[in-house]
Image (cartoon, helix red, strand yellow):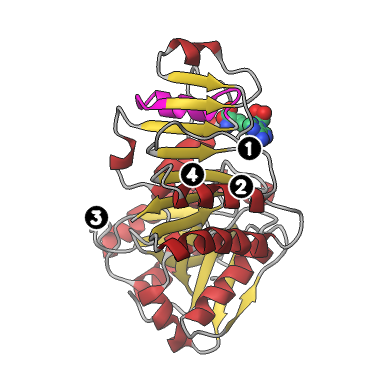
Amino acid sequence: MSACTDRLLLYCRAGFEQECAAEILERAAALGVAGQVEARPEAAFVVFVPNTAENLLPLRKRLRFASLTFARQLIFTTAPALELPVGDRISVLLNCARRLSERFSTLVLDYPDTNQGKRLSTFVRKFAPLFRQALERSTRLDDPQAPRLHLFWLSSAAAYVGLSIPGNSSPWPLGIPRLKLPRGAPSRSTLKLEEAFQTFLENPPQALRPGLTAVDLGAAPGGWTWQLVRRHIHTVAVDNGPLDPALLESGLVEHRRTDGFRYRPAKPVDWLVCDMLEQPARIAALVGDWLARGWCRHAIFNLKLPMKKRYEEVQRCRSLIEARLRPKGIRCRLAFKQLYHDRAEVTGYATLS
Ligand SMILES: C[S@@+](CC[C@H](N)C(=O)[O-])C[C@H]1O[C@@H](n2cnc3c(N)ncnc32)[C@H](O)[C@@H]1O
């Protein structure tokens, strides 16, 4: 990784800059790195600048993208190249890129996920092949071990040039997986669980083998159950509301019209998934309980965040689950991510180790 990078660029959902900033400040401090954050409201990105440039080193070595909840992408970068001259953007950007590395695995052109950012998409689409051609003349763009090169456009005259590390960043442009609503899925919510599987599980996911068992709490109309059924996972769908009849005809679904907080599985299942609209702390306590009692091995659950103190709320939910498991000596990997298909929510993933 190039020594030229001196700051971090993190993409996030517009409106969640404060949470993203609070998280990176805390995470960097835990790795011994003090710094400042530049975060404009609704900008959909934040920049973390360590107090001294060398201080980026511990973050390069030890900051894990998967451990960040509010960041959609993690880029090592420098101050943006401003005032890119209209006739000569390419050479300014090439110079920046060459200072970062001589080889890349690929080139990614991004912009903030905002209405203003989206207006840059046409410009970016036209610019990409021109820049790629110029880049290929002087650097290698096909080394899978090398970092990805990102141009993150703020306007057609200003862009960050930076690097992301395969395996420690999002693989998707803008940090957003492009998922199409599958035909036959009973609700758009189905995309949340699909994205969660793609985000948290290795590929191909061992934990989603056909023949496994699951409970879906707050299942109606059945978008999450649909994701399980299409993987041939036997599912108990718990909800007082109606389920899509096609799911019931699959022969893989049992519908239980009862309260998800009172439901008890007849025997342990592989998966608990939970999308009930409830206070986050109540959901976290419930998930902790299922894991502590050995009722499930893996869980994916949605936490609907309050208007304020959203970062603190996620930390509180994490602590609740950990506090439930610790006295029993149960080891668990726990991760939270604000997914693209989440709104004012985050998705949690827990798996016993
Ligand atoms: C956001 S919807 C779930 C959507 C579903 N995941 C899908 O993909 O179609 C929330 C559901 O939680 C259910 N729910 C809320 N509180 C519940 C509870 N205490 N017990 C069972 N279901 C509950 C509601 O009836 C509602 O159907």
SS of the residue under disc 3: loop
Q: CA distance from mark 1 to mark 3?
A: 45 Å
Packing grade of label 2 (10 A; few <14, some 14-19, many >=20) is many
Per the model, the C-alpha gap separating discs 4 and 2 is 11 Å
Q: Is residue 289 visible?
A: yes
Amino acid type at circle 3 is Asp
> Residue 145, image x and y in percent?
24, 61
Secondary structure beneath disc 4?
strand
Mark 4 or 2, nearer chain start = 2
How many callouts does the rendering have?
A: 4
Task: Give the label, 3 or 4, closer to the camera.
Answer: 4
**Which mark is first along the chain, 3 or 1?**
3
Q: Earlier in the sequence, mark 3 or mark 4?
A: 3
Cβ atoms under marks 2 and 3 closer than 8 Å: no
Numbered badge on residue 283: 2
Give the CA separation, mark 2 to mark 3. Answer: 45 Å
Task: Please tell me how crowded label 3 is: few (under 14), some (14-19), or many (20+) other residues with Cα within 10 Å.
Answer: some
- Mark 3–mark 4 Cα distance, whole angstroms, equals 35 Å
Residue 224 shown in magenta? yes
> Which residue, given by chain and number where applicable, does mark 1 sit on?
276
Q: Is residue 178 visible?
A: no
Q: Amino acid at mark 4?
A: Ile
Where is residue 183? Give x, y as percent.
Answer: 48, 18
Residue type, numbered disc 1: Met
Residue under numbered circle 4: 300
What whole-number distance in Å separates the C-alpha atoms at marks 1 and 2? 8 Å
| Quadrant assignment for ligand 1 | top right
Residue 264 in the image: state x and y as whole percent.
Answer: 52, 35
Amino acid identity at mark 2: Ile
**Which residue bears the numbered disc 3?**
142
Mark closest to the chain's N terminus, 4 or 1: 1
Residue 315 falls left or right of residue 229: right
